[in-house]
Amino acid sequence: MNETEEKFGQIYFAVLGAVALAFGVAELIATVPGEASWGIMEMSGIFLPWRAIILLSVGFFYLSSVKNFAEVHQLAKAVMASIMIWIVAGIAIWARIAGSIPGEETWFNSLEGFLASYAPPYCPEMFLLPFSLVIVYYILKEGETVK
Amino acid sequence: MRLRAQVKKEVVKVPLSVDERWDLIEKISKQTVEFGARKHTLKDAIAELTVKPLTGIPVAIAVIYGFWAFFCEFAGTLFTDGFMVRLFDEHWLPWLQSVFPGGLGNPFYALMVDAGHLEEGVLVASDNCFEAFGMLTSGLFIVFGVVLWAILAFYLIFAILEDIGYLPRLAVLVDTVLHKIGLHGYAIVPTFLSLGCNVPGVTATRPLETRKQRFMMMTLLAIFVPCGAQIGIMQDLVPEMMGWIFLTLAIGYLGFGFILNKIVPGKSPEIIMDVPPYQMPTLKNIMSKLWIRTSGFLLVAVPFVLLGCLIVGLMYLTGAMDWLAAVFGPLLMVWFGVPSETVAPLIAGFLRKDLAVGMLGGLMEQGIMTPFQVFTSVILLCIYFPCLATFALMIKEENWKELLGSLASLIAMVFVYGGLIHLVGIMLGVA
């Protein structure tokens, strides 16, 4: 990757890491009452403490990857952090899919019920998901360098 | 030639100690392998991150979270709660109740469809398959309504992790912890496999080098690792207790492993394990593994669950269950703090643990047990005896001395650990 890409990566993942860390702290605090919501963001569920730990780790991984970002071991930390977000957000999406198919009174959900299952609120990891996808560009760039 | 002579000279001194063996390997590799300059790829760097404790543990937490959450959503939300409960409770059970000959109170009907239960002295029909306890109702519901989906979800994720190459890295990561109880990091593979079914888990202990390690591993698997079927039913019945149940079992696994390591004679040597590079799993491999494992599981589970329903039903009908409850009831109540009705699930647990936990569900529905008694009973069911299929395999894999040792450990563990849980409950004021 060139210098501009490296610089952009450093700033981008530093910001993303800070946001992930803040979300992680918020989830950790939310474990005390058991749930918390902020606008269309909701933090709840029996796995909340575990998700908080994962999100805090994601934040640390991103932040620690910033220095010398182009170096492959540093980049790997950002990749790992993104994969962790994909796991948690992927499960959140899967939970909505699983809940949206069966109906309450009928075998299958109605179209309205199906669509309503995907309405907000969302967990913090789902907000981070699209931003974490930027790492794919750097993975492809790294692949080109190896070739 | 010089190398061959040197190896010959070293090998003459058999048996080599572990350190001598490693020295020999190093000498051979130094003279035979050429290491060129090689740039680390992203894959290599990620592979390193997943085995270093500081970065590997958070990754392991994320992976296990993904594993467990997928399992709950796939088996619980989508299939069991979404479709199967409705299919069995609203259609299958009422249909059988209406067409099966005999009716409530008839012994054959009770064995096959619905034993019913007493409400204010009157025998009433069950309205769900956990309570009915017939071979065609509870038996089929447990296997095809709950367990099948839990097993599918478990083996799907297990096969993906296996094919990606994550499991050997998890083994490296937990190696230090498992060495404290005399096991190698590889022990995580049979442990994980046992979370699907104890039978392949016990088989997977074969690569462990010494009898001591195999004995310890098999005993720990039989006592502290619930199978996927049992987990699926537990998740359906007591989802809010799952964290505590797993924590209690994990403490028992490590604590009892530590004690076994101290008292069982023998060595716990290192084993060399291949850690392959990360790779993309192929759909064909995943599907074939899923098919082999799930069909193998069903072949073992279906007959045992149906047989279990039949035996328990017969014991109820002949009064044998009441007699056993009267004999063992005081012991269960005083030592473990669970009601005498728990005798029936404990007996069914000899055949299938999932069936036994399902029976506890029936007792919960009837309001016979407090939440803490449910918790204690679930733990007791996990630790008191392996299911018949696992026991049969243990007979095959262990010699009679080891088998007796395993059984003695089981009995001691049930009384010590079960009593301890009751004691903790009394101290906390919940028992």
Image (tube, rainbow, N blue to C red):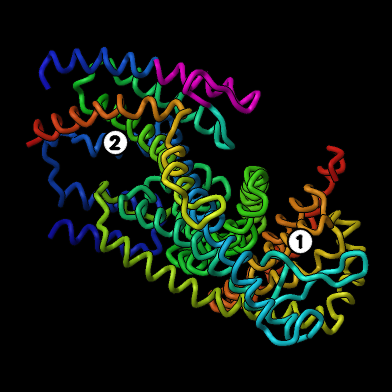
* Chain to which mark 1 belongs: B
Q: Which residues are magenta?
A: A19-42
Classed neighbour count for the residue bearing mark 1: other residues with Cα under 10 Å, few (<14), some (14–19), many (≥20):
few
Q: Earlier in the sequence, mark 2 or mark 1?
A: 2
Q: Residue A128's x, y, as percent?
A: 37, 25
Residue placed furthest toward the left: A147
Q: Which mark is residue B46?
A: 2
Q: Residue A58's x, y, as percent?
A: 40, 26
Which quarter of the picture shows residue A71? top left
A23 is within the stretch colored magenta: yes
**Front residue of B163 and B10:** B163
Residue at the spot 76% in from the left edge and 61% down from the top edge: B412
Q: Residue B273's x, y, as percent?
A: 35, 54
Q: Secondary structure at mark 2?
A: helix
Q: Which mark is residue B412?
A: 1
Q: Quadrant location of the N terminus of chain B?
A: bottom left
